[in-house]
Amino acid sequence: MVEFADTAPRLAALAIEVPSWAYGNSGTRFKVFGTPGTPRTVEEKIADAATVHRFTGLAPTVALHIPWDTVDDYGELRAYAEDLGIAIGTVNSNTFQDDAYKLGSLTHADPKVRRQAVDHHLACIDVMNVTGSRDLKIWLADGTNYPGQDDIRARQDRLAEGLAEIYAQLSGEQRLVLEYKFFEPAFYHTDVPDWGTSYAHCLALGERAKVCLDTGHHAPGTNIEFIVAQLLRLGKLGSFDFNSRFYADDDLIVGAADPYQLFRIMVEVIRGGGYGPDSDVALMLDQCHNIEQKIPGQIRSVLNVQEMTARALLLDTEALDAARTAGDVLLAHEIFNDAFYTDVRKDLAEWRESRGLPGDPVRAYLADGYQQQIESDRVGGHQAGWN
Amino acid sequence: MVEFADTAPRLAALAIEVPSWAYGNSGTRFKVFGTPGTPRTVEEKIADAATVHRFTGLAPTVALHIPWDTVDDYGELRAYAEDLGIAIGTVNSNTFQDDAYKLGSLTHADPKVRRQAVDHHLACIDVMNVTGSRDLKIWLADGTNYPGQDDIRARQDRLAEGLAEIYAQLSGEQRLVLEYKFFEPAFYHTDVPDWGTSYAHCLALGERAKVCLDTGHHAPGTNIEFIVAQLLRLGKLGSFDFNSRFYADDDLIVGAADPYQLFRIMVEVIRGGGYGPDSDVALMLDQCHNIEQKIPGQIRSVLNVQEMTARALLLDTEALDAARTAGDVLLAHEIFNDAFYTDVRKDLAEWRESRGLPGDPVRAYLADGYQQQIESDRVGGHQAGWN
Amino acid sequence: MVEFADTAPRLAALAIEVPSWAYGNSGTRFKVFGTPGTPRTVEEKIADAATVHRFTGLAPTVALHIPWDTVDDYGELRAYAEDLGIAIGTVNSNTFQDDAYKLGSLTHADPKVRRQAVDHHLACIDVMNVTGSRDLKIWLADGTNYPGQDDIRARQDRLAEGLAEIYAQLSGEQRLVLEYKFFEPAFYHTDVPDWGTSYAHCLALGERAKVCLDTGHHAPGTNIEFIVAQLLRLGKLGSFDFNSRFYADDDLIVGAADPYQLFRIMVEVIRGGGYGPDSDVALMLDQCHNIEQKIPGQIRSVLNVQEMTARALLLDTEALDAARTAGDVLLAHEIFNDAFYTDVRKDLAEWRESRGLPGDPVRAYLADGYQQQIESDRVGGHQAGWN
Amino acid sequence: MVEFADTAPRLAALAIEVPSWAYGNSGTRFKVFGTPGTPRTVEEKIADAATVHRFTGLAPTVALHIPWDTVDDYGELRAYAEDLGIAIGTVNSNTFQDDAYKLGSLTHADPKVRRQAVDHHLACIDVMNVTGSRDLKIWLADGTNYPGQDDIRARQDRLAEGLAEIYAQLSGEQRLVLEYKFFEPAFYHTDVPDWGTSYAHCLALGERAKVCLDTGHHAPGTNIEFIVAQLLRLGKLGSFDFNSRFYADDDLIVGAADPYQLFRIMVEVIRGGGYGPDSDVALMLDQCHNIEQKIPGQIRSVLNVQEMTARALLLDTEALDAARTAGDVLLAHEIFNDAFYTDVRKDLAEWRESRGLPGDPVRAYLADGYQQQIESDRVGGHQAGWN
């Protein structure tokens, strides 16, 4: 049996990137509810992100989304974040909200639209050069709604061409991270629907092109930890977008829908070398707090990842290997579950306190006054959202 | 073999209700694209609906959605529609866009919110009394996103109470039609997720409470024609919301995703007595034309229902019964498919022309000038949408 | 916060019925693997079931399946079981293995086949009268593989007729429990595919007809705890068939695929009055140990139910109600999860020992020698399976 | 508009391989029903396959499954088939029915079991060398049922090693075709669950390793025609296993569940160069006729593929390209559907007759006497099945 104390040192390596947009309003096509204290500016989003880090020590970077987070001076923005104790991380492009993109962006039949989409990514790289971001993350909403609407094969070729042009502009330290998604907003076919498609494009691009795995972007029943293991084996897992789901891309708090799945994912991440100081796999959140409080929602999220990482680190791999070699199905399953069922919450609280952090970050945040402050300060203006 | 000519008289009974909101803009949480010519007012929506009927003879009624279609004088609106040759049909309530409904409406833990939701429905009945509408359709977005968030059992009891109060206010000719939906916008549990739940509530309410079946509101793989057959058998099928889907509630054009399924549904509708002058089952559309033209999209939709109804009427039920009695699986399947594979389009075109309608309503519409007219007329103002 | 000690007394009420067929061989259509020590006779199955009870104190009854468990003298069988410290529970009928049932049983187009199926159930009631069983459980494999193959509406009427004849033969203490299943072995339509259908038939039959919920018999994504809550509310939940699944009706060990779901189900069982001495809801296992050891598999299964029941009993319902009333989504979710994440295993071990049971029933069984004994004794003969 | 007459010449290229096991009995884990006339020997299976070809002209080759089709002299078997007018096609290996394979074959933790599995494939290649088969098809049942049961990453490495050893033994004309499957018989993880995994292994192996796409082996909602297009684009589509499904791997008659999907697949096959004399993509059936007659079931299957191919060839690609370039969603969809909705059955019947084949192969077969003959001849012996 592995003890918490033995694993604690490895826990210190955990760093989770939070998305700037999680602090803005989000919702469904039916309604976007507002909430008191929601940021109106990029700076306010970054302040919230820094607050999550202050209470948890887990969220040292914040991802930007362009154009939602467009500012005049990215150097200033970078300095602003650093003053608050965090860094700017991944830059996410947006090719789904301009009217031109109604029928696609990098895959559009019209070369002018594809040009616009490529140029947008080149502009994102310009931002990265200033913010010091390593990763350009591309999630494409491209797809079609009706059979026959467009040529799905030709769209792959157009996509490959556009990606190649973008990739060519990256500097030697930068990476292109290509996300896949099963469906939505396209309802018949999606141009990057599965890890295989993302992998094939990344292979064609080169070494600094990697796959982004969003845990909510799969068909029902998909074994996600298998994909994690496979992509790590192939050297092509670039980053995670963590969230959880019961149905589709629900974007709920990571670990909320199926904590056991999150455990299994973290086990494979660790098993495959995707965790720790030597790994370049980025762990990010991508969630929507439609009805719950946003900052506490983000705190809960990073804590969920931390708790499951702690459990995964408890796995007695030696005993497990012995059971597997013996073909003892039930014993192997039991050893695996021993780690999952171990309640690490008290140990983690103590460990946090030993590092100068609040033992219960949620309670500490609620008691702190930050929430009350932003609710009274952030009055007027336009609350940030997905536009 | 049944001939088209033999079935043509029964085709005349087909009437499909179109939703006012199909003519406004719709989209996903990622983007709502605008289109030239989109209505700005209820009257413009009704004019578009009347145009669909003018070219197809299939859409004699239009459903309203309150408050999207709120007007000062519903008597005037009724007269306006009638002048255009159509009637106002079902009234749809909305309990998902007021800020109060963030955590529910008829099921909300707070009695004040439940009161507001009940009152909204009573106001809808007031509208119905003026418009002459028979059906009050209730689709509830109510549900929760996180396990433990609320008491799912208590919510059922609250729901039953609210529905009873609404039902009590209906006049003897009016009906309450309760729609169910698998998920969205709630992502953990939905308060009316399946036909069983809707059926149980309708049973408790009384004879004029019926189930609304939206063809896009089921779990993956659900056999929808079975539910049609069952609800007709139980005397509780009130109406359809027709659309099609590949994944979730995609709200695509009916018949676009799986035409064979639409055929099977129409076969059961006819088989179970849900079709024709003696049936009170309402056939409605509920779709979103996110990327395609809206009026041609609606024309295509009602034509799809007509084509599949024509095929279903071709079914040689006598030969089929014989094959079934003989236990001849392949022959029964083949007889069934003979009807589906018969190309009725030419016959239907002639039949339409014999009734003074254009043989090809889509081409006729595109050649007519209506689209150009509304695109040049409807400039300025606020295009209608889901708000 | 609720303490384990406070809930322990309620734990004593837990009783889980095990199925005789879990001790026989099972598999997929691809292969049924044999295992040393597998029972050859009904008596050997019952001995294994009694062994599970001896080590856990949780499995006081064993369900029979007719004709797999056919014996000449059911009175003797009853006495045999009672001598081993357990009782005979539910009787399960089988209408899927006789050649006559190829195209259906109670729903078959041919009245002779329906007669045979009804008679089989009457014979099962005869067995129940001797064994003292309360429940006749009917799971129907009936359905069709091809659209058009048979009249799905007529099959409902035939089903209703057959069930009524069976129900009429039950004595006043006996119940008919009707199970539903999404699909398999039928691949186009199933005659009792969902809880709504089972509920509608049970309503028509009368008070002693109840629904059986098999946790593996739903469409992907179905919220099972909602159905539990609804059926308890409607007074129609008769029994559970517990197992777990990732894909279809995988029949894995209950709690193995999604422990959090099992927790949520037990919470609703308790919430809705389905747990404890005053409830008549039967908790049964229905699993296949295709590749793992069978008796330890059953021990693990009943322990999983016990552990999740213990967690569910820890739920601080008072604090939860307060959070729900306040609309505090995150707090309610956290209180809910506090119970789930509490590691009850040590407390349960002590509690077992205080009741004269082994603290770790799995280890105790493995150390006991029973397994070795049956492996050396049960040589020759025909290992029991699904035939 | 394209006319049937223009496309007829291309139809002649259609050749569909039938599986020997389709003529034997199959079923579910619940029951395998026997049928009169079922073959008892490999020769009888081949005779049935040749009969399908005789009536349709569509099935010139038959696939073998080793060891189900083991004979002493494969040269004799080849001559026997050729005498009947067909050739022996793909050789399918079996690594799921030997007791050694309970926990895996090429991925098993025990090197001795892996050795056995590799050797079995080498033996299959020996068969191919005699039968003149081009393709060795590998479908692996390998996987696990319980989280933690085995190391899913290590299993990939073992798999790669085993495949490499097998691949190395192929002659220059032979190919290895690796099939993927979502789930079943493994219920937690499958070692080759998706096209991405199969693709990655084929890439590592070399040019003569290709992916086999079974149309029933995907998660619910998966867009299969996209995968077809992608694999053709990547040059890695080796073959199809055609069948249809509503739920899981139902193995129904191809085109029976969703004819529109089969149409879309054939459109992409043709679009991507996977059809016709210059293509090396093998079109095979892999179905189970559990309840329907087997030979007529196979005839219906190849006709379904032929009918959908004929429709797909009718596609007016020029008009379609124009509509797509114009971004006219509805027009492109309509042009696409024009081909699908065209009833080609009469034209096909005439075309068949012009080539000396029966216009209605199903009726011709039923009238022929072959079925009566085999039913009276094939009495006694052991009907062939999956063992």
Image (cartoon, coloured by chain):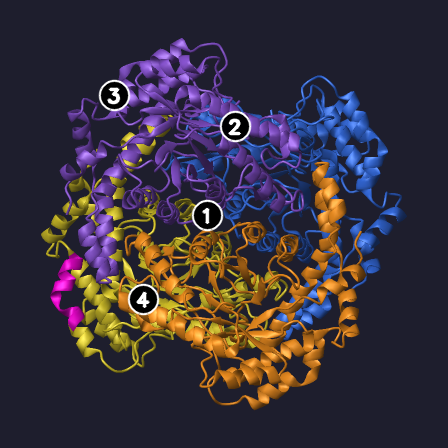
Chain colours: A orange, B yellow, C blue, D purple
Q: Residue at x 56, y 36 (%)?
A: D185
User: Mark 1 Cα within 10 Å, few/some/many (few <14, many 20+)?
Assistant: many
Q: CA distance from mark 3 to mark 1?
A: 37 Å
Q: Amino acid at mark 2?
A: His
The stretch in magenta equals B361-372
Secondary element at image label 3: helix
Q: Earlier in the sequence, mark 3 or mark 1?
A: 1
Q: Quadrant of residue B7?
A: top left
- Residue highlighted by disc 3: D364
Asked whether the residues under the numbered discs 3 and 4 touch, taking CB atoms below 8 Å apart as contact, a structural biologist would say: no
Q: CA distance from mark 3 to mark 4?
A: 55 Å
Asked whether the residues under the numbered discs 4 and 1 touch, taking CB atoms below 8 Å apart as contact, a structural biologist would say: no
Q: Residue at x 49, y 67 (%)?
A: A172
Q: Earlier in the sequence, mark 1 or mark 2?
A: 2
Q: CA distance from mark 4 to mark 1?
A: 32 Å
Image quarter in which the C terminus of chain A is found? bottom left
Q: Choose between C124 and B207: the one closer to the eye.
A: C124
Q: Is residue B242 left or right of residue D187?
A: left
Q: CA distance from mark 3 to mark 2?
A: 40 Å
Q: Is residue B365 magenta?
A: yes
Q: Main secondary structure of the magenta part?
A: helix
Q: Amino acid at mark 1?
A: Pro
Residues beneath discs 3 and 2 located on the same chain: yes
- Residue highlighted by disc 4: A114
- Residue highlighted by disc 1: D220
Secondary element at image label 4: helix
